Amino acid sequence: MPRKRKGRNKIQHFYCPHCESRLWRMNSPKHFLFYTGASEIRQKVRVTLASAIFLASKGDYIDTNSWIEEFYCSRDGNLWMKVTRKTDGTQSTNLASQEDWKRTTYTIQPNMPNPSVSEFTYRMSRQNGIRYYEKL
């Protein structure tokens, strides 16, 4: 069985947009983007107008070629990047914007606290293992 390890050459590396060091995937779930209108589908997915109208008539279109994923940089920490798979099989990344987060399903933006959690609980969860009785 020749060429068992052929797939190892196809691994694509991503680099931090701030410091240009290598990014590492954090095995987070992929948060796929969705689009609603025909004009939006045509612009983002790059299909013909007829195809965009057809896809929009079925409801929201989930783009399986674009998603938001968490990466780790040794200098900048955790980064949420928008990954886009191109037609030739390569992938490109850029930082996820507010608009990208609005286009994902069932996600809460990680930079903002959950609105259903109280301020006290949020503050206590950020105290790296310090207990209340240790402060006294």
Image (cartoon, grey):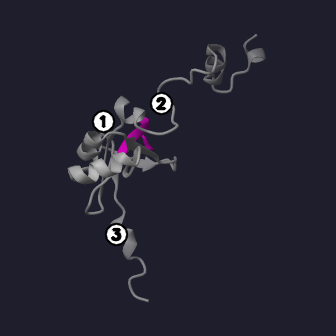
Quadrant housing residue 113: top right
Q: Which mark is residue 41?
A: none
- Amino acid type at circle 2 is Gln
Q: In this view, does 128 lie above or below 119?
A: below
Q: Does the magenta stretch include residue 69?
A: yes
Q: Is residue 76 above or below residue 57?
A: above
User: Does dot 1 land on a helix, a strand or a loop?
Assistant: loop
Mark 3 to mark 1: distance in Å?
26 Å
Q: Where is residue 96 in the image (x, y as percent from the top left)?
A: 36, 36
Q: Give the range drawn in magenta.
A: 68-83
Mark 2 packing: few (<14 Cα in 10 Å), some, or many (20+)? few
User: Does dot 3 land on a helix, a strand or a loop?
Assistant: helix
Which residue lies under the disc numbered 3? 9
- Earlier residue among tags 3 and 1: 3
Question: How many marks do you count on the picture?
Answer: 3
User: Does dot 2 land on a helix, a strand or a loop?
Assistant: loop
Q: Residue 109 carries which label?
A: 2
